[in-house]
Amino acid sequence: MPFPSLPAVFEAALTAQGYGEPTPVQAAVLAEERADADLLVSAQTGSGKTVAFGLSIGPTLLAGEDRLGRGGAPLALVIAPTRELAQQVARELEWLYAKAGAQVVCCVGGMDARQEARKLQAGCHIIVGTPGRLRDHMERGRADFSALRAVVLDEADEMLDLGFKDDLEAILDGTPEDKRTLLFSATLAKDIVTLAKHYQRNAIRIDTTTRDVPHGDIEYRAIRVAPNELELAVVNVLRFYGTGGALVFCATRESVRHLFGSLRERGFSAVALSGELSQKERTDALQALRDGHARVCVATDVAARGLDLPDLNLVIHAELPQNKAALLHRSGRTGRAGRKGTSVVLVPTTRRKKAEQLLHSAGVSAIWSGPPSAESIRAADRDRLMNDPMLKEPATEEDVGLATALLEAAGPEQVATALIRLYRSRLPEPEDLFEPVAEPRGQRPERSERPARMRDRPDTDRPGRDPRDFGGQEGSGAPWFRLSVGRNSNADPKWLIPLICRLGHVTKNDIGNIRIFDRDTVFEIDPRVADRFMQAVYNHPDDAMRIEPANDPGSAKGAPRRGDQKKGGNKGKPNAPVAPGERGPRGIVGPPRGKGGPPPFGKKSFKKKVRMD
């Protein structure tokens, strides 16, 4: 479906940008019966809203003329919630109105207000800005809104959520009553409708969103990751989807700093976006992405609001979103304006249930898998090399001459090898990742076969009790392992269990009985995961916490060492298996002093080692 009849200046601009047909929101807004009306529009992010309202207000601003005259008091005002979105809207309107001779001024916080004031004083046709800066210019007499013919509120719901209601009302109260008002919002909540009723006249309501349905152009993938390999998983996902731009979301500024530094160290062309950066730093980062000098952007949720980055085909949730709205908002940065995109959710094995609930609440059907392996990444590299457009471009006469000289000097095989090496030298090396074993959904073992929780486990120290049987066969037993921390280091299941899970890439249900001695601790591991548990420990050794195979402590070979015996104590016998906080032979198992007691390798190191991801 082609665009409706538009002024010639806009048709030329759309053709130059490669626009063939309108998106649903553009077609709805440009319908003939809505040409001069106030509009209340609900549309998804990435649906082409900027072009939609830019074209809609175009005839209102031109008023039958072919071009706009000399700039004076502005004719249109566009208000956006964030600096980045305002600057993005201004750039879109600049190319859309270029042939109409429009002058667009962007006014946002963090930029030079005096320079903005000089531009306003020189005259313009369209002002784009954030509520706070626009109100400041208005109250200081720098911005004259008396000649406005149209006002657009972009992402109005976000502006109200950020607390700009007073600023919006102050600005709108200072505009002419006979102007057109277009209000765009992702949702039409009660406060949005109230604002519309107060400042719009007989507004036509347009809803182009599909409720509770994820974006159809986005493919969702959920990748199981060991908790201590999230950073490595980001590397492999970026390498696997090796083309186009990528946006990586973190939960905190500190996480952004750390992951950004790690990616840059590995050779990725990356930039960071967070609230602590200055406006210049944020502008430079976004410009690097648009110019193609950077491919990866690591950002927090707040910093990435409203971003529309070119050629962005991948979103990675390095840390799980807080809720379904955050998941859909993050993912909506890709798959925009009809383009396809991929949203990858990294799911630590310890948070599988949380991720499933999040995806289900958002109505997302994700493809579950392990992280991309180094072999699969190298295979993808081979395919990308074989299909590189440079190999199919027509050669110039100069290129042919140089190629002939190279082939004569080195031979075709040597030249091809050099090309492969050059291609690989620009790519960061993939990481060797541990792939967690997925438990088939709907095929969980019966309760009697499941690993019991600590308080339900039998006490193998007591006569007549058999060792815990993970495999479901009587008398089979389970392998034991030794951890180099004991009672002397205030060993406590409260932090031992998470530590074992993190070091060995297992869950708490894979851990059986735990015996705490004076200088070390022994514990059982489910035989079904024992091999990969030992492999994970070997692949990622920890100098402060050594784990090694051990014999059954109930056997003669597994008896406690002499150094574990204390006078007046339990003669070297281990504590009975206990759950965190339960009472054992020596009372509550845990540190005898303070709130946690320092282990032998220092308090600072202790906090780092037992922190849950």
Image (cartoon, rainbow, N blue to C red):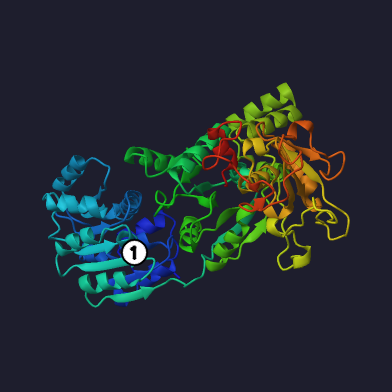
Image location of residue 44, percent across then percent down = 43, 65
**186, 124: nearer the viewer:** 186
Image location of residue 175, percent across then percent down = 15, 63
Image location of residue 419, percent across then percent down = 67, 32
Image location of residue 274, percent across then percent down = 41, 44
**123, 439: nearer the viewer:** 439
268 to 554, vertically: above or below: above
Q: Quadrant of the N terminus?
A: bottom left
Write down the quadrant of residue 495 in the picture.
top right
Residue at image coords 80%, 53%: 462
**253, 290: nearer the viewer:** 253
Q: Is mark 1 on a helix, strand or loop?
A: helix
- 198 horizontally vs 609: left or right: left
- 505 horizontally vs 115: left or right: right
Q: How crowded is mark 1: few (under 14 residues within 10 Å), some or many (20 or more)?
A: some
Residue at image coords 67%, 46%: 586
**600, 572: nearer the viewer:** 572
From this viewpoint, is residue 393 visible? no
Residue at image coords 51%, 35%: 261
| Mark 1: amino acid | Asp
Write down the quadrant of residue 286 in the picture.
top left
The residue identified by callout 1 is 157
203 to 607, vertically: above or below: below
- 56 horizontally vs 445: left or right: left
Q: How many marks?
A: 1
From this viewpoint, is residue 537 visible? yes
The single residue placed furthest to the top in the displayed view is: 409
